[in-house]
Image: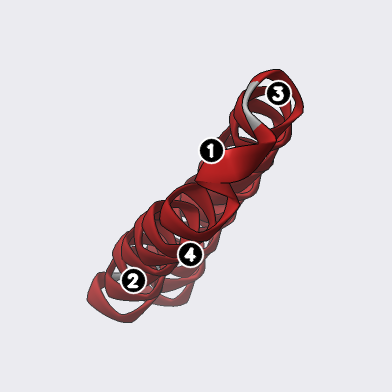
Amino acid sequence: MIDMLADAAAMGAIAKSGLAVLGAGIGIGIIGMKAAESIGRNPASFGKVLTISILLAALVEGVAFVAIFMG
């Protein structure tokens, strides 16, 4: 009985981590999409947009790592 509860808790933690990583992937995709759209509209802003989008993608990925390690 206790083993079944421990297995269920572990599966729940894995599922939550998987959802966090899925959300992070979607978020990074949206960041990339909007960065490409912004650069397409104003090519002169390439450097600023690239810097901001890399920073935001790293922050989103950091949240995913926190979610994985917090379980």
User: Tag 1: Cα neighbours inside 10 Å, few (<14), some, or many (≥20)?
Assistant: some
Q: Name the residue under label 4.
A: 54
Separation (CA) of disc 3 from disc 4: 15 Å
Between tags 1 and 4, which lies in front? 4
Q: Name the residue under label 3.
A: 37
Using the image, determine if residue 7 lies above or below residue 50: below
Residue at the spot x=48%, y=64% of the render?
A: 54
Q: Name the residue under label 2.
A: 62
Residue at the spot x=30%, y=61% of the render?
A: 63
Separation (CA) of disc 1 from disc 3: 15 Å
Q: Position of residue 38 (x, y in %)?
A: 60, 26
Give the mark nearest the N terminus, 3 or 4: 3
| Label placed on residue 27 | 1
User: Tag 3: Cα neighbours inside 10 Å, few (<14), some, or many (≥20)?
Assistant: few
Separation (CA) of disc 4 from disc 2: 12 Å
Q: What element carries label 2?
A: helix
Give the mark nearest the N terminus, 4 or 2: 4
Q: Position of residue 36 (x, y in %)?
A: 72, 35
Between tags 3 and 4, which lies in front? 3
Residue 20 as seen in the image, left or right of residue 66: right
Give the mark nearest the N terminus, 2 or 1: 1
Residue 61 as seen in the image, left or right of residue 18: left
Q: Position of residue 71 (x, y in %)?
A: 32, 69
Using the image, determine if residue 37 lies above or below residue 64: above
Residue type indicated by callout 3: Glu
Between tags 4 and 2, which lies in front? 4
Using the image, determine if residue 71 lies above or below residue 24: below
Q: What element carries label 3?
A: helix
Residue type indicated by callout 1: Gly
Give the mark nearest the N terminus, 1 or 3: 1
